[in-house]
């Protein structure tokens, strides 16, 4: 076991950060909701909530980093953080699973049924006569108007290469950290988050292209819905991951992390591999097949 | 912390170990598993009464045929809000509260593994339910499309719609963080010689529950996010004209929803598995088989979701698969029921309030289980679907099931929490009133459903009048009986001082610490063997 009787598990005394976080969530959620309902003030309430949450995240992680540098965490605390991060990533996987599930259900069930497959001959004949099941589609109602499909080659392929490369660079950085090669660590870590930000930028370029040139929008039926929701949530996660990598980079510059104690680095690296794996799923099922 | 108590297992209290701070800060900024557990339990009780009042509105309206008290729209709001509040606000937080209080004590941990996150997962709940309850006063009223939020109906909600979606997001966030904390605590913080299969049953069932929570709460978040974007951002997830399908929502929702059912009952199994051995003065029969049965139930819960949608249109193969998979769940559940009965077999039993609630649980939950088997049969379900038979079924598993187990757990551990015995006479009165009235409320609903009375409708045909009146009388009686529990809590510190063991047959580490449990326990890991051998 990791515990020795002379070694206490670190239980922090009261912290105000969770309460600040709850306040931020209150403002954020009430703000977004009233904004969606058409109340102009909602937007500013939302921004206030967002600011409180950023303040909370900064303060909370700041406190944890301080405690970590102060040597308050023993191996057992470290294990708690590791397991916590693992299960957090698993919950994220399940969130994406819901949207992948929607994609597969639409492609394999809903659309073929609208086209009359299985026992749905009359659904097709009476409701959507003439609709033939294809993929991609914006449905029998041609929702969102005519559009062009986003081709898998070009930008998406470049983005795949960028993200896969960044997974390799972060691994090289990790090995450098373990071996104590700090310069190599900094260079490859910097390369990783730069690749991440370039990915996000190119994703933005792709979105502009889709909206302006292809008339492919969030409203382009089920294809547009799944395309933008999946790539959008993924892009959001890449952005968060790249910001986290940047923070880890500055911590490296400040001299944090040792070859045998660097949980935060590893947690962010895991997260980065997770967005990478999600992207591979996206590339295969959204762009390619 | 009481000055007279000596914590033998954490004798080396050092200078950083101090008592709670004064004032609101103790609760708002708490990182103490016992304080957070208390907050969860109090919050849950509050929600139980708010959700209960809504049930009273429903049953008053249904007492006699015709419309008497409320508008149909408001009636629909009541059924929707009652369900959301009871599921996410009363039952789930109550079990998280019990987990917070008891798991660290049962496994010999100094606290939950991630104490600050523990605080956050609680303090999100008042925000979430504040937002949800505020929808009652919004233009268009509170959500009225049912707690299952099926589109396209739910998209007709007024201003409440985005508030509903985001409050569900917050509840999910809270549950996920709570579940991560439970898993990490159990896996990482056990006393050194407490191996997995030596863990108490309550800890085991919560471990499995926590896995379920992490797997399905994000899926619910995804489903309601799709509702939100369909409503406000022009997506077509649930719009057939765009190639989507409203039925797809039901699939995604119930992929969450069915494991959710077990999230609400597995910890109840755990509580009952702690209590019955204590008052039968025997070891739990088949501890390991209980673990495997709970794991089987958890696994099966992922592959049975479409039995909630048998009438919605599904290929025949799908209907057959979901029917047989559902009936399979009766096997591991049966293992548990028989193990409880076998635990009591030739035990020297006494019938204090926790035991009474547990016995009623075993008996009445089984009734709910059997009506569940009837509903699992697809050809029969076509008749039962959306009738009061379904209402009777899930209230039997949730009220004399989950709620009775929570009550049993509360009575069982109350002396450990307060340091005093509760008033046994009041407890027994609470039990008997609850048990009589819960059956009076829900048993006639079986007959109503089989006779064809639909659920979620404020009026009904006159032939249903008699049983509805019986049911309403029962419901008002059940609601009032719960005030006895409040009386028990208010007098909880007036009783005799509790010993450390509290119950003659008690077993496990939580009974080795003083009553009331000191603010900090197990700052150094205890020897689990001492507790585990108490029966040998």
Image (spheres, rainbow, N blue to C red):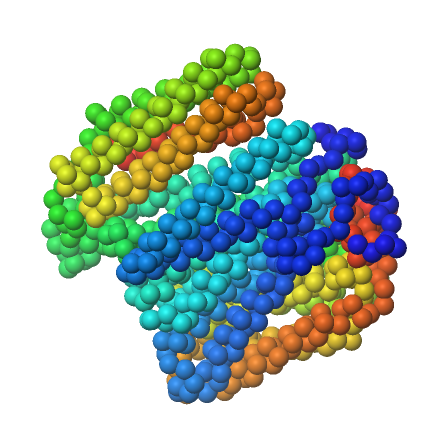
A143 left or right, relative to A278:
left
Residue toward you, B93 or B533: B93
Name the residue: 26% across, 45% down: A225
Q: Is residue B208 visible?
A: no
Image location of residue B158, percent across then percent down:
32, 67
Name the residue: 30% across, 66% down: B156
Name the residue: 49% across, 41% down: A57
Residue toward you, A56 or A218: A56
Q: Is residue A210 visible?
A: yes
Image location of residue A96, percent across then percent down:
39, 41
A69 left or right, relative to B493:
left
**As displayed, is residue B138 above or below residue B502?**
below
Image location of residue B405, percent across then percent down:
65, 62
**As displayed, is residue B272 above or below residue A70?**
below
**As displayed, is residue B203 above or below residue B503?**
above
Quadrant for the N terminus of chain B, please. Answer: bottom right
Image location of residue A134, percent across then percent down:
19, 42
**As displayed, is residue B92 above or below residue A171?**
below
């Amino acid at each position: 076991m990791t515990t020795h009787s002379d070694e206490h598990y670190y239980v922090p005394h009261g912290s105000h950060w969770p309460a600040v976080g709850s306040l931020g969530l209150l403002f954020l959620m009430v703000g977004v909701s009233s904004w969606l309902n058409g109340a102009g003030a909602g937007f500013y309430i939302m921004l206030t909530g967002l600011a409180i949450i950023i303040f909370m995240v900064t303060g909370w992680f700041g406190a944890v980093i301080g405690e970590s540098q102060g040597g308050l965490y023993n191996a057992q605390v470290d294990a708690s953080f590791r397991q916590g991060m693992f299960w957090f990533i698993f919950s994220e996987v399940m969130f994406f699973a819901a949207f992948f599930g929607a994609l597969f259900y639409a492609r394999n069930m809903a659309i073929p049924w609208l086209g009359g497959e299985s026992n749905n001959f009359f659904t097709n004949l009476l409701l959507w006569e003439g609709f033939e099941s294809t993929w991609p589609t914006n449905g029998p109602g041609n929702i969102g108007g005519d559009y062009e499909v986003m081709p898998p080659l070009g930008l998406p392929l470049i983005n795949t290469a960028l993200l896969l490369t960044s997974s390799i660079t972060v691994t090289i950085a990790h090995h450098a950290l373990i071996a104590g090669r700090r310069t190599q660590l900094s260079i490859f870590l910097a390369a990783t988050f730069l690749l991440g930000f370039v990915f996000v930028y190119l994703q933005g370029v792709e979105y502009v292209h889709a909206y302006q040139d292809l008339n492919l929008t969030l409203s382009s039926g089920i294809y547009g819905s799944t395309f933008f929701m999946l790539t959008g949530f993924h892009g959001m996660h890449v952005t968060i991951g790249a910001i986290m990598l940047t923070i880890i980079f500055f911590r490296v510059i400040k001299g944090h992390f040792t070859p045998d104690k660097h949980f935060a680095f590893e947690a962010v690296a895991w997260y980065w591999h997770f967005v990478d794996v999600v992207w591979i799923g996206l590339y295969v099922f959204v762009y390619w097949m | 912390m009481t000055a007279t108590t000596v914590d033998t297992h954490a004798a080396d209290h050092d200078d950083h170990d101090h008592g709670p701070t004064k004032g609101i800060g103790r609760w708002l900024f708490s990182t103490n598993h016992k304080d957070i557990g208390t907050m969860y339990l109090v919050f849950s009780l509050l929600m139980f009464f708010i959700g209960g009042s809504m049930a009273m509105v429903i049953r008053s309206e249904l007492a006699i045929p015709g419309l008497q008290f409320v508008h149909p729209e408001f009636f629909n709001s009541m059924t929707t809000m009652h369900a959301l509040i009871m599921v996410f606000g009363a039952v789930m937080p109550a079990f998280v509260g019990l987990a917070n209080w008891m798991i660290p004590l049962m496994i010999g941990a100094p606290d939950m593994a991630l104490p600050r996150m523990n605080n956050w997962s609680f303090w999100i709940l008042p925000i979430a339910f504040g937002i949800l309850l505020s929808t009652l006063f919004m233009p268009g009223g509170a959500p009225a499309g049912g707690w299952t939020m099926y589109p396209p109906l739910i998209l007709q909600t007024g201003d409440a719609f985005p508030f509903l979606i985001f409050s569900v997001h917050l509840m999910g966030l809270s549950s996920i963080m709570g579940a991560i904390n439970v898993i990490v605590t159990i896996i990482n913080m056990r006393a050194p010689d407490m191996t997995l299969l030596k863990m108490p049953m309550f800890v085991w069932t919560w471990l499995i529950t926590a896995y379920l929570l992490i797997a399905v709460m994000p899926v619910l978040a995804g489903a309601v996010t799709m509702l939100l974007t369909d409503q406000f951002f022009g997506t077509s997830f649930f719009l057939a004209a765009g190639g989507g399908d409203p039925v797809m929502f039901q699939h995604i929702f119930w992929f969450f929803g069915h494991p959710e059912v077990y999230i609400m009952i597995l910890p109840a199994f755990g509580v009952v598995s702690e209590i019955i051995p204590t008052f039968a003065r025997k070891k739990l029969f088949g501890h390991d088989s209980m673990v495997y049965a709970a794991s089987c139930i958890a696994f099966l819960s992922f592959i049975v979701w479409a039995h909630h949608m048998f009438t919605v249109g599904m290929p025949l193969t799908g209907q057959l698969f979901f029917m047989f998979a559902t009936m399979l769940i009766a096997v591991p559940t049966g293992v548990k029921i028989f193990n409880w009965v076998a635990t009591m077999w030739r035990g020297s039993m006494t019938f204090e309030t926790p035991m009474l609630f547990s016995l009623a649980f075993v008996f009445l939950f089984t009734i709910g289980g059997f009506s569940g088997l009837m509903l699992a049969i697809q050809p029969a379900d076509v008749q039962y679907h959306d009738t009061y038979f379904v209402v009777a079924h899930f209230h039997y598993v949730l009220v004399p099931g989950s709620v009775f187990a929570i009550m049993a757990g509360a009575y069982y551990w109350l002396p450990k929490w307060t340091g005093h015995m509760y008033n046994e006479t009041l407890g027994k009165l609470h039990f008997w009133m609850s048990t009589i009235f819960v059956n009076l409320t829900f048993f006639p609903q079986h007959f109503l459903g089989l006779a064809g009375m639909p659920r979620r409708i404020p009026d009904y045909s006159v032939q249903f009048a008699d049983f509805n009146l019986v049911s309403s009388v029962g419901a008002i009686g059940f609601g009032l009986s719960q005030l006895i529990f409040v009386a028990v809590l208010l007098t909880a510190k007036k009783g005799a001082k509790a010993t450390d063991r509290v119950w003659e047959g008690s077993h496990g580490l939580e009974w080795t610490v003083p009553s009331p449990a000191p603010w900090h326990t197990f700052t150094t890991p205890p020897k689990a063997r001492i507790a585990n051998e108490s029966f040998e």
